[in-house]
Image: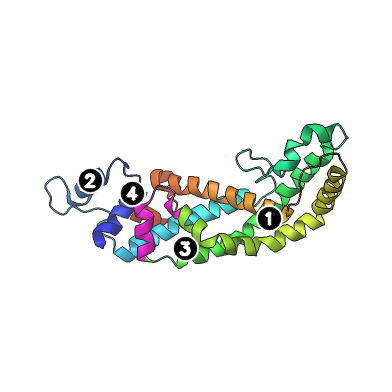
Amino acid sequence: MRVAVVVLAALLAGAPPATAQGLLDTLSKKVLGESGAAAPSAASALTDDQIIRGLKEALRVGVDSVVGQLGTAGGFAADPQVRIPLPRTLDDLRGMLAGFGMSGRLDDLEARMNRAAELAAPQAKDLFLKAISDMTLDDARAVYDGPEDAATGYFADRMTPDLKAAMRPIVDDTLAEVQAVRLYQGMVRQVRAMPVAPNLDLDLSDHVLDAALDGIFHYLAREEAAIRADPAKRVTEILRRTFGTD
């Protein structure tokens, strides 16, 4: 158990991911020294509990960074990586709808959807922190055995329904408040009056929620990878002690 958890710490400290044996060789030299005798190091001085606390702290740092980034004005709208697009059927009709003077309304709808996501994103923070607090040693092992975004995948698998439930009231209220739903429904009525109208039976809140969660997990995965690899990201005492930067 001790070896598995220390290997996890070494991985999160930026150990090269070439092969499991290579990682173990690197770790043994770091912890035991070239001669095989025990050598002092930050990792070897820590208990299993402290190392897991370091992992959890790393994830908390990542969550704080992502929510702070996306949960502000322009967090989604000004970022091409996560900007929420129009529903595909509307976007595919953009050229035709522009001919009917609806181009500005499409742009307006897209801006309002992104603002709704920005206002809803902070609602995810407490759920992430609870999930981090509930992580067990077995959860940490699964993170180690997976790829560099394994913790993000762990959250996505376990938390998506709860995140959608927590964020949906904010998205619903915000879309209604900025009249995005009314705007969308008006465009749908116009499109349905056109010959050979496409199917636009879409829940706008679901569209915004799915895209917002994709954006959160996109940046959480990047933050996770950065904390594993970049000492500058290890900004708290427990992170520095766990990942050997003191």
Residue 83 lies in the magenta stretch: no
Location of residue 188 in the rendering, given as x and y in whole percent from the top left corner? 82, 47
Kindly report the distance in space between the C-alpha atoms of the residues bearing marks 4 and 3. Answer: 19 Å
Which sits in the foreground, 74 or 127? 127
Which sits in the foreground, 44 or 127? 127
Q: Which residue position holds label 3? A: 132
Point out the image quarter for the N terminus.
Answer: bottom left
Marks 4/1 in contact by CB < 8 Å: the verdict is no
Amino acid of disc 1:
Asp
Q: Which residue position holds label 2? A: 21
Amino acid of disc 3:
Ile
Nearest to N terminus: mark 4 or mark 3: 4
Check the image and report above or below for 136 versus 211. Answer: below
Q: Quadrant of residue 96?
A: top right
Lateral position of residue 241 relative to residue 112, left or right: left
Q: Main secondary structure of the magenta part?
A: helix
Q: Which residues are magenta?
A: 137-151
Kindly report the distance in space between the C-alpha atoms of the residues bearing marks 1 and 3. Answer: 26 Å
Marks 2/3 in contact by CB < 8 Å: the verdict is no
Location of residue 22 in the rendering, given as x and y in whole percent from the top left corner? 24, 43
Q: Which residue position holds label 4? A: 11
- Which numbered dot is residue 149? none
Kindly report the distance in space between the C-alpha atoms of the residues bearing marks 2 and 3. Answer: 29 Å
Amino acid of disc 2:
Gln
Nearest to N terminus: mark 1 or mark 3: 3
- Which numbered dot is residue 206? 1
Nearest to N terminus: mark 2 or mark 3: 2
